[in-house]
């Protein structure tokens, strides 16, 4: 059975890498279909190089545009590739426009869809990711749920039990595989003059935060306040989406160290040495939890409630006072939680399931 693996953005490349590695190990007949939603070197190519992934056979080069235009271009491009290749199954990961369009194109061609990271819900339908993940789940016949909680959500939406597999999240595989390499490589915290546990890391790029000038300014004010109160460096690798909005809204955080997005090994180093991580990213909430670093989520909801249940994360929203208050609270907490996202074998389980079901 031929397998199409879709990757379109930074988190999909990182989280699909363990699946691709297993497919390679099993000499499976597969190819990578890149949508081109992310195209800047430091959001795309750097991960293929660093994680030693095979080249994508196709790159649709859709680039950036409105939701409808981007989704439509991916739908058309994926349909053409699938008609030419006729795979038995297509694998998609996460919740971006790329994966919604790919899943939709495939299901209409009666090609089986496997959704890696199924069953996550923020219950906020204003977020594009929530719509994408719900629809992708309901197009799929293999749903890889990271946790029992995600499985219960899918069952509650009427997905039949035979389609759902609790595999853990492939981010655990990716972190376990790369953390030692990252630590051995040294140099990022040093280059920034950082000492372990004496700095904070921020990421912030989600549409609901950075496309709203008032909300973006309010979060940055909270972060500036933390840097001043704690007298610690706050390192923010700025996603190009946020960089663009920061410049449009003329926002100039005073106390943050703004850097360009970094590669995965450097980011793992930064995260694992941080005293606290503040983020609106899905993947970064998971990584903080896996690495034992407390996390403050700069959002009103999360589709990763397991991180809150184990005491690793808290929802702070966008108010400066609440961001400062939540940061103080998380710093004072016991940090010995269990990682709820599996044992680092999700990639292997997913490949065994889809290859066993052919
Ligand atoms: C997308 C996903 C988001 C995910 C994020 C991962 C959707 C709706 N959003 O958000 O869920 O968390 O990827 O990082 O699918 N840009 C570049 N270079 C690039 C790509 C984008 O400069 O390679 C800039 C462009 O100005 C573009 C903006 O970022 O307009 C937004 O890009 P887009 O792909 O629409 O969404 P992301 O914010 O990257
Ligand atoms: N990441 C990275 N470099 C950075 C920032 C993030 O490699 O400068 C990685 C991070 O380790 C995580 C992934 O990007 O695995 C998360 O992607 P992102 O935050 O863009 O998307 P989300 O998870 O919110 O969809």
Image (cartoon, rainbow, N blue to C red):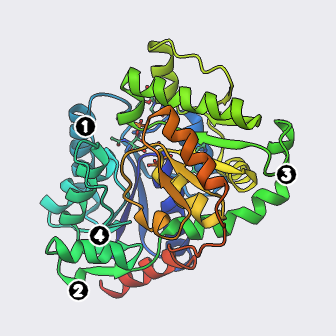
Q: Which residue position holds label 3?
A: 186
Q: Which residue position holds label 2?
A: 162
- For disc 4, does the CB lie below 8 Å from ligand 1? no
Q: Which residue position holds label 1?
A: 73
Q: Which residue position holds label 4?
A: 89
Q: Which residue occupies the foreground of this view, 310 or 15?
A: 310
How many marks overall?
A: 4
Q: On the rendered structure, is 209 left or right of 179?
A: left
Q: CA distance from mark 2 to mark 4?
A: 17 Å
Give how far across and how far down residue 97 sits, in percent. 30, 45
Q: CA distance from mark 4 to mark 1?
A: 21 Å
Q: Secondary structure at mark 4?
A: strand
Answer above or below: position of 316 versus 149: above
Q: Residues within 10 Å of mark 3 (few under 14, many from 20)?
A: few
Q: Which residue occupies the foreground of this view, 240 or 287?
A: 287
Picture quarter with the C terminus: bottom left
Q: CA distance from mark 2 to mark 3?
A: 45 Å
Q: CA distance from mark 1 to mark 3?
A: 41 Å
Q: Residue at x 38, y 80 (%)?
A: 166
């Amino acid at each position: 059975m031929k397998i199409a693996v879709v990757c379109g953005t930074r988190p999909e490349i990182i989280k699909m890498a363990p699946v691709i590695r297993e497919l390679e190990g099993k000499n499976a007949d597969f190819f990578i279909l890149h949508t081109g939603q992310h195209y800047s070197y430091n959001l795309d190519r750097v991960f293929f190089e660093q994680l030693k992934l095979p080249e994508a056979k196709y790159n649709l080069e859709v680039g950036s545009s409105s939701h409808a235009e981007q989704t439509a271009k991916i739908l058309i491009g994926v349909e053409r590739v699938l008609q030419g290749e006729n795979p038995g199954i297509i694998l998609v990961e996460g919740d971006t426009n790329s994966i919604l369009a790919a899943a939709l194109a495939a299901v209409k061609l009666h090609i089986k869809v496997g959704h890696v990271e199924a069953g996550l819900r923020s219950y906020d339908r204003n977020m594009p990711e929530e719509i994408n993940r719900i629809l992708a789940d309901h197009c799929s016949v293999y749903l890889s749920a990271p946790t029992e909680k995600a499985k219960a959500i899918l069952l509650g939406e009427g997905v039949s039990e035979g389609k759902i597999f609790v595999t853990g999240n492939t981010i655990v595989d990716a972190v376990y595989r790369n953390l030692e390499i990252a630590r051995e490589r040294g140099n990022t915290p040093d280059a920034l003059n950082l000492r372990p546990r004496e700095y904070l890391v921020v990421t912030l790029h989600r549409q609901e935060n950075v496309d709203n000038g008032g909300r973006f300014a309010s979060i940055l004010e909270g972060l500036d306040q933390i840097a001043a109160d704690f007298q610690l460096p706050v390192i923010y690798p700025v996603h190009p989406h946020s960089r663009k909005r920061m410049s449009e809204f003329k926002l100039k955080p005073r106390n943050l160290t703004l850097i360009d997005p970094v590669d995965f090994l450097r980011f793992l180093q930064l995260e694992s040495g941080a005293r606290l991580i503040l983020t609106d990213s899905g993947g970064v909430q998971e990584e903080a939890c896996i690495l034992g670093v407390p996390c403050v989520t700069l959002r009103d909801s999360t589709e990763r409630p397991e991180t809150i249940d184990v005491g690793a994360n808290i929802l702070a929203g966008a108010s400066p006072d609440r961001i400062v208050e939540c940061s103080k609270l998380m710093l004072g907490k016991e940090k010995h939680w269990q990682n709820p996202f599996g044992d680092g074998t999700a990639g292997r389980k997913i490949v065994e399931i889809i290859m066993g079901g052919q």
